[in-house]
Image (tube, grey):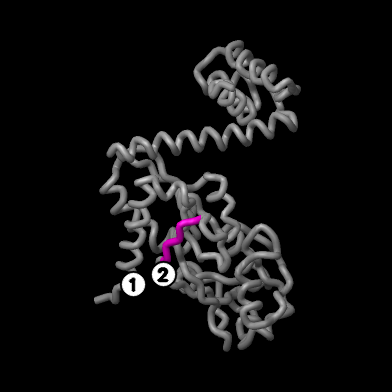
């Protein structure tokens, strides 16, 4: 199975057009078609079908596409790691980070890491809730920055603890629910859940830590803008890191609800897959994260 054939399939699926895929790879359309046909003959199946607008992947084609993308990504990681082990600090690094980490830790880390390793291309992907760790497991990001999940499979990840964070309850500014004084007062009102489903998220964690049944889900989001918009414009309750909730921009639209139970205390940390932690750029980025967190923890003048 040729890597060129796999890349031809990937380009065709993502572009939805053989002509566009050929242009992307810098080959002729007949040459690209031949590569895909060779792959189909090797697998004895149809991977692409023509449509009125271009080409579409069959079910078999999508299976091959997803595996090919993962394989190409892993090969790229291997090339970067080999070069870095030989002292050539080049390549790319993808970071998945929650908004609080983007606001507090990422800028300083990017500044110092960028100065030390200017030939490493950094890509930041904002995540609202990293507990699923889907991107990290798929290899779409090298490092995940966010509140550490309570249960992690042993040996799967390298875990670096960075700093404590407090998640506070927030409501729309002027919402009568902002006068609540205990979780019991908010147990029957709709909450915004952060995650893939209502079965996950910090609201569920907060209530369960106090021995209470999780509240109803008014909405499920995986977007900071979505979370802020829903809470600021309706009657849903939600959780935000204290530093974000008290930011001047947020206080225009949100009130922090002072509950007897206090905030939900979490630990902000960095996770990397055990195999990718051997990559020098990952280890160096972790060290710069620790430096930024330490600097943030120092008392002001």
Highlighted range, magenta? 157-161
Q: In which quarter of the image is the C terminus?
A: bottom left
Label 2 or label 1, whichever comes before in sequence order? 2
Q: Where is residue 137 in the image (x, y as percent from the top left)?
A: 56, 49
* Mark 1 neighbour class, 10 Å CA radius: few under 14, some 14 to 19, many 20 or more: few
Q: Is residue 187 above or below residue 17?
A: below
Hey, which residue is sitting farthest left in the picture? 301
Residue found 41% across the figure and 69% down from its top: 163
Residue found 29% across the figure and 42% down from its top: 118
Q: Which of 189 and 82 is in front in this view?
A: 82
- Real-space CA distance between mark 2 and mark 1, rounded to the nearest whole angstrom: 8 Å
User: In this rendering, would 10 be left or right of 98?
Assistant: right
Magenta run includes residue 147: no
Q: Quadrant of residue 59?
A: top right
Q: Position of residue 250 (x, y in %)?
A: 50, 69
Q: Name the residue under label 1.
A: 297
Residue 163's disc is: 2
Instruction: Confirm or deny contact between disc 2 and disc 1 (CB under 8 A).
Output: yes
Q: In which quarter of the image is residue 200?
A: bottom right
Q: Which of 240 and 273 is in front in this view?
A: 273
Q: Is mark 2 on a helix, strand or loop?
A: strand
Q: Nearer the viewer, residue 50 or 244?
A: 50
Q: In which quarter of the image is the N terminus?
A: top right
Residue found 50% across the figure and 56% down from its top: 157
Judge whether residue 129 can be spotted in this image: no
Q: Which of 262 and 181 is in front in this view?
A: 262
Q: Where is residue 206 in the image (x, y as percent from the top left)?
A: 61, 76
Q: In this view, does 56 lie above or below 170?
A: above
Residue 250's disc is: none
Q: Is mark 1 on a helix, strand or loop?
A: helix
* Mark 2 neighbour class, 10 Å CA radius: few under 14, some 14 to 19, many 20 or more: some
């Amino acid at each position: 199975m040729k890597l060129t054939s796999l890349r031809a399939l990937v380009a065709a699926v993502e572009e939805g057009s053989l002509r566009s895929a050929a242009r992307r790879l810098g080959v002729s359309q007949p040459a690209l078609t031949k590569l895909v046909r060779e792959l189909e003959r090797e697998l004895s199946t149809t991977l692409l079908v023509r449509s009125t607008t271009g080409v579409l992947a069959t079910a078999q084609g999508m299976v091959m596409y997803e595996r090919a993308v993962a394989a190409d990504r892993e090969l790229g990681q291997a090339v970067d790691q080999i070069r870095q082990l030989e002292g050539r600090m080049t390549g790319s690094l993808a970071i998945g980070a929650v908004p609080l980490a983007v606001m507090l830790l990422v800028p300083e880390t990017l500044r110092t890491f960028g100065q030390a390793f200017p030939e490493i291309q950094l890509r930041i992907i904002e995540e609202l809730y990293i507990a699923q760790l889907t991107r990290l497991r798929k290899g779409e990001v090298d490092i995940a920055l966010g509140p550490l999940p309570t249960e992690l499979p042993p040996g799967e990840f390298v875990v670096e603890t960075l700093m404590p964070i407090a998640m506070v309850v927030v409501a729309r500014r002027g919402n009568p629910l902002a006068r609540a004084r205990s979780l019991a007062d908010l147990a029957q009102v709709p909450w915004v859940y952060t995650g893939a489903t209502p079965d996950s998220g910090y609201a569920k964690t907060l209530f369960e830590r106090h021995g209470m049944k999780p509240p109803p889900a008014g909405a499920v989001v995986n977007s900071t803008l979505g979370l802020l918009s829903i809470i600021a414009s309706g009657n849903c309750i939600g959780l935000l890191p204290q530093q974000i909730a008290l930011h001047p921009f947020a206080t225009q639209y949100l009130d922090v609800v002072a509950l007897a139970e206090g905030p939900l205390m979490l630990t902000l940390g960095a996770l990397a897959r055990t195999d990718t932690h051997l990559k020098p750029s990952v280890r160096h980025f972790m060290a710069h994260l620790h430096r930024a967190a330490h600097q943030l923890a120092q008392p002001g003048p």
